[in-house]
């Protein structure tokens, strides 16, 4: 365990972007909240065609809804930053140590190739997401506090109210969704690690080229698009799942429904936990394990130093 | 004592090239073995094979393990420095210590820190900020602090100036080596290590052409300079190498009793460097690289 933790620390030393980028994104967000121009002239908030303006009275439930959607949206740029950083990390994870020949130093230590590669998988799919989640959680909280101080005394004040219950709910869904997304995208990560362990140069090209060529060949030879659809489903499937129930939720408040009920339905709809019940997810995890195994073999037998 | 390394019938080909051509050897604990050969002779392949870094055919046991199946376990007892470029540029000195401490059960951090204090290396520095000599010192500090049985050095002092090279080998002998430890060194700079070796192994074209204790060299090899008058007599004794300098001939003999050669001139024991040249340029062995 101590060894595995050390291997993960090593990943953060080598790829500083993994911990710095979410912090930088958080810094920008906080700065935006703290410094952006606030104007109450004609200020209007609209969520899903529901418009709020200053003239309108606002109920407690509506405030909670605004709070929930607001903190979720505030955390989103940090997540996007993380996805970009993890992508480049995976491309370099097995290639960097061969490029600078430091692989001979790492291999002079009593650490198996398997532990090394799995530490990279854990870094990309568990440690960085959880870390980013913590950064996001602190950022939206701090952002909310700064924002509410800034709007206090302005007409916007009445739209802004802290809601601990909603806060917990949003954080719980965010964490669950990130971990489900990690499982969903595990085969993509496994593929990238295997290519990164194999390619002698231009890793990003080798990651993108084979799928592009396969799709192209299929279209030329069979005039079909099965591979394209298959790859497309894997890449966008997670978000399609998130949006599956957006139809009714998009309609806004139904008759007799309180704002609170609407919000909790909406929250359930954006939870991806049910994806765990899909066979595609677990099939993908199985493929990912196979690809990680390929990366391990590659690291063990590839001899190009 | 059982050998720390025993290799039998090692074979490794890269395409048409025989990097290891049926190589067998044993190394006892407490020896310092120089593995010497021209470029492309198979030195690095032999080292990689015993470190579990490359697949090969044949039988090999290193510290009681097959390096092909248990590299990670083997590395508890084996250390190696491949050459100076190998520590990653982004690594900080403190991170290097943290890492080895975190993964190596036989690492003594205090010992490494003590050694580093005697150098100009700052704990906060990254490898990219250190000179080549300092990087080697850092690597050496890490290795001195590991209680290993076997240390493998592949061109460890390549690109270092004379002061660093001397200091490197002095530290190795004084602070590291003892009768339970074994060191294998490959280098081009034969002269530099000849005085510290207990054994020499010459490798050429994937074959071991000499495997001999340094103590045993004087009894086996003789060098004599003969004038033209004795040239025919000397050649009749089958020298393994002859070299003409200013009309006189330097002859090297393998396995001829001294009594047989004394009439030719003054005998001396060839240095390892001389022997290397003699054996590597033997026509039967092909030209030296």
Image: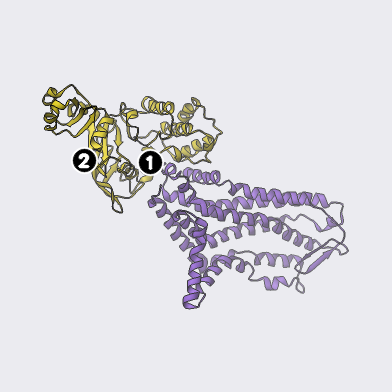
The image position of residue B8, as x and y in percent, is 23, 44
The image position of residue A94, as x and y in percent, is 47, 51
The purple-tinted chain is A
The image position of residue A69, as x and y in percent, is 72, 61
The image position of residue A251, as x and y in percent, is 73, 73
Q: Dividing the picture into quarters, in which one does residue B50 lie?
A: top left
Question: Is A90 situated above or below B84?
Answer: below
Question: Is B280 situated above or below A43?
Answer: above
Q: Chain of mark 1?
A: B
B75 vs A264, left or right, is: left
Say which mark, if any, is on residue B38.
Answer: none
Quarter of the picture holding the C terminus of chain B: top left
Q: Which residue is mark 2?
A: B283
Question: Quick one: B68 or A258, which is closer to the camera?
Answer: B68
Q: Give the residue at x 38% y 41%.
A: B75
Q: Dividing the picture into quarters, in which one does residue A67 lie?
A: bottom right
Q: Residue furthest bottom?
A: A223
Q: CA distance from mark 2 to mark 1?
A: 40 Å
Quarter of the picture holding the N terminus of chain B: top left
Please tell me the colour of chain B: yellow
B95 vs B187, left or right, is: right
Q: Give the residue at x 33% y 48%.
A: B68
Q: Nearer the viewer, mark 2 or mark 1?
A: 2
How busy is the neighbourhood of tag 1: few (under 14 within 10 Å), some, or many (20 plus)?
A: many
Say which mark, if any, is on residue B75.
Answer: 1
Secondary structure at numbered mark 1? loop
């Amino acid at each position: 365990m101590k060894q595995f933790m050390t291997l993960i620390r090593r990943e953060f030393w080598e790829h500083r972007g993994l911990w710095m980028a979410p912090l930088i994104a958080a810094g920008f967000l906080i700065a935006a909240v703290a410094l952006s121009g606030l104007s109450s002239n004609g200020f209007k908030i609209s969520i899903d065609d529901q418009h709020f303006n200053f003239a309108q009275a606002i109920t407690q439930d509506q405030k909670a809804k605004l709070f929930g959607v607001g903190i979720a949206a505030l955390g989103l740029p940090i997540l996007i930053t993380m996805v970009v950083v993890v992508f480049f990390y995976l491309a370099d994870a097995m290639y960097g140590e061969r490029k600078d020949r430091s692989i001979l130093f790492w291999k002079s230590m009593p650490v198996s190739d398997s532990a090394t590669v799995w530490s990279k998988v854990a870094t990309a799919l568990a440690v960085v997401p959880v870390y980013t989640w913590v950064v996001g959680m602190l950022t939206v909280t701090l952002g909310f506090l700064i924002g509410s101080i800034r709007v206090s005394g302005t007409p916007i004040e009445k739209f802004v109210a802290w809601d601990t219950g909603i806060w917990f709910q949003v954080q719980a869904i965010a964490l669950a969704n990130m971990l489900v997304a990690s499982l969903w995208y595990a085969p993509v990560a496994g593929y990238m690690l295997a290519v990164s362990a194999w390619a002698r140069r231009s890793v990003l090209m080798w990651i993108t080229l084979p799928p592009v060529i396969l799709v192209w060949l299929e279209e030329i030879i069979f005039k079909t698009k099965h591979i394209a659809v298959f790859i497309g489903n894997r890449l966008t499937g997670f978000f399609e799942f998130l949006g599956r129930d957006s139809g009714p939720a998009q309609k806004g408040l139904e008759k007799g429904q309180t704002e609170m009920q609407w919000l909790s339905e909406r929250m359930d709809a954006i939870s991806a936990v049910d994806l765990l019940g899909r066979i595609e997810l677990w099939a993908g995890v199985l493929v990912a394990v196979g690809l990680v195994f390929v990366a391990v073999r590659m690291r063990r037998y590839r001899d190009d130093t | 004592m059982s050998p720390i390394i025993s290799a039998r019938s090692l074979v490794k080909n890269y395409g048409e090239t025989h990097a290891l051509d049926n190589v067998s050897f044993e190394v006892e604990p407490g020896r310092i073995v120089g593995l010497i050969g021209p470029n492309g002779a198979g030195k690095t392949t032999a080292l990689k094979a015993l470190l579990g870094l490359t697949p090969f055919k044949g039988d090999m046991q290193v510290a009681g393990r097959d390096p092909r199946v248990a590299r990670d376990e083997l590395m508890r007892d084996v250390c190696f420095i491949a050459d100076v470029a190998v520590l990653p540029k982004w690594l900080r000195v403190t991170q290097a210590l943290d890492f080895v401490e975190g993964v190596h059960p036989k690492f003594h951090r205090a010992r490494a820190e003590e050694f580093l204090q005697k150098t100009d290396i700052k704990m906060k520095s990254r490898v990219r900020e250190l000179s080549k000599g300092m990087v080697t010192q850092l690597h050496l500090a890490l290795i001195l602090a590991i209680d290993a049985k076997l240390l493998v050095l592949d061109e460890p002092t390549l690109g270092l100036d004379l002061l660093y090279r001397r200091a490197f080998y002095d530290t190795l002998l004084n602070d590291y080596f003892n009768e339970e430890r074994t060191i294998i060194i490959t280098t081009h700079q034969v002269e530099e290590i000849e005085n510290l070796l207990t054994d020499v192994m010459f490798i050429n074209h994937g074959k071991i052409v000499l495997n001999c204790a340094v103590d045993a060299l004087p009894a086996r090899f003789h060098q004599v300079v003969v004038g033209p008058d004795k040239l025919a007599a000397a050649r009749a004794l089958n020298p393994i190498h002859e070299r003409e300098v200013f009309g006189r001939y330097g002859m090297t003999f393998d396995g001829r009793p001294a009594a047989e050669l004394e009439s030719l001139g003054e005998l001396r024991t060839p240095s390892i460097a001389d022997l290397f040249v003699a054996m590597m340029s033997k026509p039967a062995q092909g030209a030296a690289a």
